[in-house]
Image: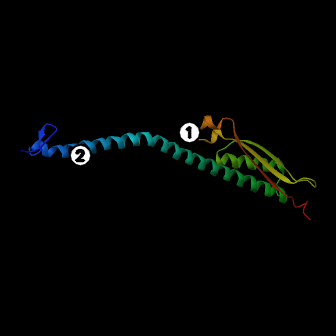
Amino acid sequence: MSTRRGGIRADSWRGRLRPVAGLLVRRLGERGASAVEMALVAPVFLLLVMGALQFAHVMFLRHEIYAAAQQICRQLALGADTAATATSALRAELQRIGVTGTLEVVAPTPTTDASVSVRVPLAPLLWTDLFRPMVGDAAMQLRVVYRSSSRTG
């Protein structure tokens, strides 16, 4: 006499297929679990990737603004520009980069150094509305100071 497994004889064809059917059910269940895990992890992963790309974009713009301010400040310190022409050149450079902000350009005198200060609000720099509530009214501030040639020595 054959042994019974769950009311089904083990030597019958249904008894032999039962372990195989259990394996199939387990595999299909794992596939569903993978889909659920992916649905839970994907939004978090995409948020992290978008945040990293946004951060890289803002750091690139910061570098471009700093390079423009440094170039203008150097020209001021060497006496190649006046404050008015330096301000208009810096505004043109910021417009080329695609940002707007407040500028303060100080031409060198016998007692002061040449300096350029730029303040750019962060919210317009973001290309997605997802991070704007986190930024709020924050601004990026840069200041470049060059010792003027008349003050050296």
Q: Is residue 93 above or below residue 150?
A: above
Three-letter code for the amino acid on which mark 1 is drawn? Thr
Q: Provide residue 49's location: percent of width, then percent of height.
A: 52, 47
Report x, y in % for residue 9. Answer: 10, 41
Q: Name the quarter where the C terminus is drawn.
A: bottom right
Q: Which residue is situated farthest in the bottom direction here?
A: 153
Residue lying at 91% horizontally and 60% vertically, measured from the top left: 151
Q: Identify the secondary structure beneath mark 2.
A: helix
Q: Nearer the viewer, residue 120 or 2?
A: 2
Q: Earlier in the sequence, mark 2 or mark 1?
A: 2
| Quarter of the image that includes the N terminus | top left
Foreground label between 2 and 1? 2
Neighbour tally class for label 1: few under 14, some 14-19, many 20 plus, Cα within 10 Å? few
Q: Which mark is residue 128?
A: 1
Give the quadrant of residue 81.
bottom right
Instruction: Write down the residue under mark 2.
Output: 23
On the picture, is 125 further left or further right than 86? left
**Mark 1 element type:** loop
In depth, the one of 40 and 139 nearer the eye is: 40
Q: Nearer the viewer, residue 53 or 109?
A: 53
Q: Residue at x 87, y 61 (%)?
A: 149
62 relative position to 104: left or right: left
